[in-house]
Image (cartoon, rainbow, N blue to C red):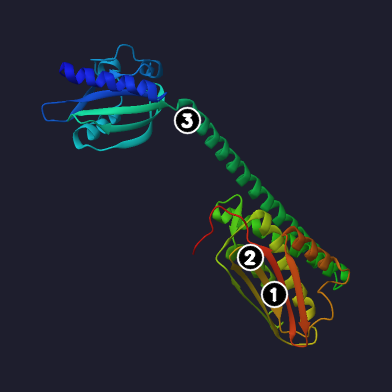
Amino acid sequence: MDAITALSAHGTAEIFDKLTDDGFCICEIVQDDAGNPIDYRFLAVNSRFSGMTGLKDPVGRTARELIPNLEHKWIEAYGRVALKAERLRFREGSDALGLHLDVFAAPTSSFGQFALLFRDVTEMHRIETERERALEFSRKLLEEINHRVMNSLNTMSALTSMEIRDLADTPERSALSRVRDRIKALAELYSSLNRTASVDRVEARSYLGGVLQFLRSSIGPNDGVEISSEFAAMQLDTRSAVPLGLILNELVTNALKYAFANQKSGSIRVTLTRDGDACLLKVSDDGSGISSAPNNGSGVGRKLIDAFVLQLQGRLEIASGARGTCVRVYFPAPSLDAQNPA
């Protein structure tokens, strides 16, 4: 390196002292006989360089002289900058330096030379790493909790079913069956979470379809009631999924119990649609209609529906006539970082 180049590099380093608190240096790549980069030499550094890197009196010396075990990835990257005129911006850690750096590297006007502007982000990287580990631990813990809750709910459902089998066809049996169905609706949420390895969101088709599948299985083969469904391809967070699944369970169960009392056959149609920020769950049947909102003998079903709609911050509409009943639940779309576009 000639004296003019050295003075120019030194002057540039002094300028960067006044412009930034970052470390700055100008270097030249060192090549072997085949032209491969094997090291780089420091031509000029600013006053913050040594304090940031711990390297004393670097000017005129090479990186491998100062840091014998320096990882080759640094030399390879800077070789591309110096010899191929690439510009690089990256964050990288060095075990040899004991630092994590945010680096901007650019070629200079002299072939084989490059400038580095960098800052120490070691502490920031440590905090980010600890946060990621904590988040992963929380996710694993929540997965385990979800799994245990699912198992507990399934056990409760099975025990309730055993009690139901021992009861005659009485109001008590009917009430206990409703309790079991609600438990199964909750259990389906946790089953969906486990199937997708998610801890906070489920696919609407999978989850609500599972709730309906259980209700279908409760219909005898000769009951003559057909349940059909169509669900929008969207995700639900657990705060929305819980009340929505329970609303669906109540509405379909009510339709099965009351809509076809005077008919030998019928159909129930369930849809979930989304239009922008608004969603609509619709449950309709072609039964005999009702004179008031669907409920069971004690009115618990309707009270639960109202409570779950309130939890969704939604709105309930019921229309009924001789050709059947249609219940609409309007609610705001769940706020998620990303919805499944499929």
What's the distance in space between the residues labelled 1 and 2, CA to CA? 17 Å
The percent position of residue 304, horizontal first and vertical second, equals: 80, 63
- The numbered mark at residue 125 is 3
- The numbered mark at residue 283 is 1
Instruction: Work out whether mark 3 precedes mark 2 in sequence or the reverse, and give the earlier one.
Output: 3
Instruction: Work out whether mark 3 precedes mark 1 in sequence or the reverse, and give the earlier one.
Output: 3
Going by the image, does 15 lie left or right of 336?
Answer: left
- The numbered mark at residue 18 is none
Instruction: Work out whether mark 1 precedes mark 2 in sequence or the reverse, and give the earlier one.
Output: 2
Q: Residue at x 58, y 64 (%)?
A: 206
Q: Nearer the viewer, residue 264 or 116?
A: 116
Going by the image, does 266 lie left or right of 258?
Answer: left
The percent position of residue 274, horizontal first and vertical second, equals: 60, 67
Evaluate if marks 1 and 2 touch, with contact meaning CB atoms under 8 Å apart. Answer: no
Residue extending furthest toward the left: 33
Judge depth for marks 3 and 2 and give the one in front. Answer: 2
Position of the N terminus, as image quadrant, is top left
Tally of marks:
3
Judge depth for marks 1 and 2 and give the one in front. Answer: 2
Q: Which residue is mark 2?
A: 278
